[in-house]
């Protein structure tokens, strides 16, 4: 009888211990991925706000007719240009191969947006209004914000698919453990 | 500007040799404008050297008006041909946030009809 109980424990405890270890490892990994995903999502949202602020600053600069306001408007545009450029560089660095297509699109939109934002007679000695440029800044800014939304959505979708893999693995492991338990009972009987 | 006579290649750092805060298009726009950088720094170096490495590290940013005046202006004024970009004038940066200015420079240079091809 003692030998049979020992057999049951052997078949119960060994897979149980392995399952606990694997579950712990998978949970730890999933927690890390979740934190990174949440950070990236928030960062993309912040960058979309920066783009919107950059659009407002650009519109104010290229619609201005008051030379006294020019230095402050100029500095504001440069500040947001820096914010957008730095944030987009960080977002691109955190993207994988799956995001390559949307990242290429974001890069092209970023190039054009920055061109419109600080191009033309930006930085000139006196105020120069530029209505066509204002329209292009607004339009290009909207396209860039849209592309950032696509990237965020794509990364969230990929994360949902990714979560299924460890869950499936865990289910298979538990099933295997169940079979071992049944085998242990069959030995005892 | 660091001269290297053996290879006849010089490196120019915009931040170190010009300004960390370049801006403006024309000379009247200030002492760190694109026209001044192009005509007073790049053009003489292009005449005297086989190639130039332009290092972007350290600048706060490169406003498009400045950057277009430098690269579009190099082509417009005949200092350089578009096909010489990358061989006679190389752009470098180790800062990911400044990488975007490299394709922008090529875009500005390519958008200009070369002097001999203008109608």
Image (spheres, helix red, strand yellow):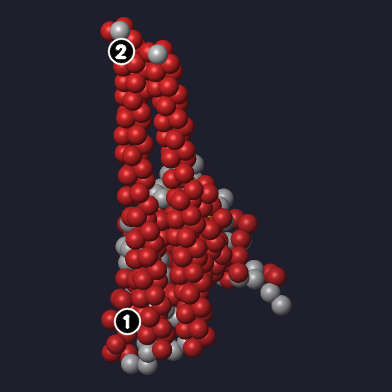
Residue bearing mark 2 = A5
Image coordinates of residue B111 in percent, x first then y, are 60, 69
Chain ID of residue with mark 1: A
Residue A25, x across and y down, in percent: 33, 33
Vertical placement of residue A169 versus A73, above or below: above
Other residues around mark 2 within 10 Å, as few (<14) / some (14–19) / many (≥20): some
Q: Residue at x 37, y 65 (%)?
A: A45
- Give the label on residue A133, or none: none
Rendered position, A169 above or below B13:
above
The residue lying furthest to the front in this view is A189
The answer to whether residue A137 is left or right of residue B110 is: left
Residue A152, above or below B8: below
Quadrant of the drawing holding the C terminus of chain A:
top left
Q: Nearer the viewer, residue B31 or B105?
A: B105
Return the residue nearer the eye: B97 or A18: A18
Q: Residues within 10 Å of mark 1 (few under 14, many from 20)?
A: some
Q: Residue at x 30, y 76 (%)?
A: A75
- Left or right position of A129 against A8: right
Identify which residue is drawn at 36% across, 43% down.
Answer: A30
Circle 2 marks a residue in which chain? A
The answer to whether tags 1 and 2 share a subunit is yes
């Amino acid at each position: 009888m003692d030998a049979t109980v020992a057999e049951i424990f052997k078949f119960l405890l060994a897979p149980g211990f392995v399952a606990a270890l694997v579950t712990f490892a998978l949970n730890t990994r999933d927690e890390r991925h979740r934190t990174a995903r949440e950070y990236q999502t928030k960062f993309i949202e912040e960058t979309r706000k920066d783009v919107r602020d950059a659009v407002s600053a650009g519109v104010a600069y290229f619609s201005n007719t008051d030379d006294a306001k020019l230095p402050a408007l100029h500095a504001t545009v440069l500040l947001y240009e820096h914010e957008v450029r730095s944030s987009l560089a960080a977002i691109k660095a955190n993207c994988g191969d799956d995001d390559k297509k949307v990242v290429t699109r974001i890069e092209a939109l970023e190039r054009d947006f920055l061109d419109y934002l600080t191009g033309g007679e930006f930085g000139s000695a006196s105020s120069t209004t530029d209505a066509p440029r204002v329209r292009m800044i607004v339009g290009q800014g909207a396209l860039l914000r849209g592309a950032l939304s696509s990237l965020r959505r794509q990364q969230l979708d990929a994360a949902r698919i990714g979560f299924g893999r460890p869950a499936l693995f865990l289910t298979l492991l538990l099933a295997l453990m169940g079979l071992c338990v049944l085998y242990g009972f069959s030995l005892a009987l | 500007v660091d001269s290297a006579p053996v290879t006849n290649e010089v490196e120019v750092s915009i931040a170190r040799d010009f300004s960390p805060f370049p801006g403006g298009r024309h000379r009247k726009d200030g002492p760190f404008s694109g026209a001044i950088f192009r005509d007073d720094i790049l053009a003489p170096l292009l005449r005297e050297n086989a190639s130039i490495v332009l290092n972007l590290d350290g600048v706060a940013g490169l406003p498009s008006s400045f950057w277009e005046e430098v690269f579009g202006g190099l082509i417009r004024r005949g200092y350089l041909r578009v096909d010489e970009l990358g061989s006679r004038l190389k752009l470098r940066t180790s800062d990911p946030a400044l990488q975007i200015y490299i394709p922008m420079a090529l875009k500005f240079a390519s958008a200009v009809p070369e002097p001999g091809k203008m109608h």
